[in-house]
Amino acid sequence: MKKILVLFGGNSYEHYISCLSAKTILENIDKKKYDITTVGISKDNTWYIYNDTLETLIKDWTKGNINKIDNIIEFLKSFDKVFPIIHGNPLENGNLQGLFNLFDIKYVGTDLLGSIISYDKDLTKIICEKNNIPQVPYITITDNKPLKKIDINYPVIIKPAKCGSSIGINIANNIKEVNKHIKEAFKYDNKVIIEKFIKSRELECAVLFDKKLKVSTVGEIKSVNTFYDYNAKYISNSELIIPAKISKELEKQIQDLSLKIFNILELKYLSRIDFLYDYNNEKLYFNEVNTMPGFTSISMYPLLFKEKGISIQELITKLIEN
């Protein structure tokens, strides 16, 4: 029986989402096939073995039955594979993958280079632009100073370059709002992206490596808000439409682009690729990639493959075994 470590938490704005994802993994992982240990990383970056209920896990797991791990590296080496269901800085951006690589610890997910590139939306955009992947007009700024003007027509969307779960994202309709939202975005990262906001449908596609690359059906998110922000994702009732009601031609275009992006960014195991479809002009744009998608009960990644006949337990097994 393989020894599997499910790792969650971390010092991130997405700590709670990681807890929700870990709960789903632990509810669905094949316990007859794997000997499972659960480890949480607290917000002060202390590592603990977690031995409590799933209900406590998503409330305040640090007040549950936990035991501190003193020698983290030796502890990690005792497992056949680590499933790091961790979202956001500082552990989805390559830091954790570098640690695993350094000590030859096997893990689920994209390796060091793919994690670094994909977590930085600016780097992702540069590489995709060089490979003729369609994107909306954008600029990147690194100075947290007021701007006098921008060379993109309003409205624009402002986001931290390295942050997930739609945190720190806002829409601006004039330069005053731009400067206000830049200041907000710089709270989460030292690099900020300003891009053209278009009225669009939000379409997503999942990729899985299962001996060969597999691509999911395409799903659509109908946000309750102007765009799919944190509130729309996890608090309000945004609608997930699986499969998306789109033409076969558009579906094929999204699936082909998803595989192309997966390969040019040198991704491994899994990813979710997000697109914007400008329905007024019938144009498709790449939006962003997620190398460790959420596994909550409402997360697109497992739901997209469920539509293809792969249960969440089977999906977890494939991610561990491949």
Image (cartoon, rainbow, N blue to C red):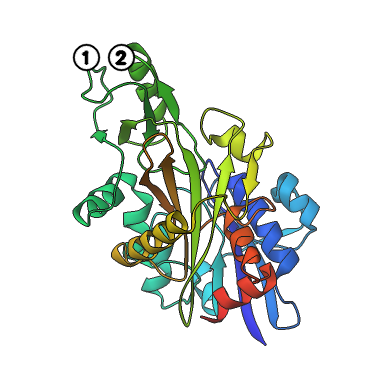
Residue on which the image places disc 1: 148
| Mark before the other along the chain sequence, 1 or 2 | 1
Identify which residue is drawn at 69% across, 72% down: 313
Identify which residue is drawn at 34% across, 14% down: 174
Q: Nearer the viewer, residue 241 or 127?
A: 241
Residue 24: image location, x then y, percent: 70, 59
Q: Are marks 1 and 2 in contact (CB under 8 Å)?
A: yes
- Residue 90 visible in the displayed image: no
Q: Amino acid at mark 1?
A: Lys
Residue on which the image places disc 2: 175
Q: CA distance from mark 1 to mark 2?
A: 7 Å
Q: Nearer the viewer, residue 169 or 284?
A: 284
Tell me if mark 1 has few (under 14), some (14-19) or many (20+) residues whose alpha carbon lies within 10 angstroms of its own: few
In which quadrant of the rendered view does residue 238 lie?
Answer: top right
SS for callout 1: loop
In the rendered view, does 221 fall on the left or right side of 105?
right
In which quadrant of the rendered view does residue 221 lie?
Answer: top right
Identify which residue is drawn at 37% across, 22% down: 155
Q: Amino acid at mark 2?
A: Ile
Quadrant location, the N terminus: bottom right
Residue 288: image location, x then y, percent: 40, 48
Above or below residue 35? Residue 174 is above
Name the residue furthest top: 176
In the rendered view, does 132 fall on the left or right side of 1?
left
In the rendered view, does 83 fall on the left or right side of 207?
right
Name the residue furthest bottom: 1
- Residue 40 visible in the displayed image: yes
Tell me if mark 2 has few (under 14), some (14-19) or many (20+) residues whose alpha carbon lies within 10 angstroms of its own: some
SS for callout 2: helix
Residue 93: image location, x then y, percent: 40, 54
Residue 248: image location, x then y, percent: 48, 58
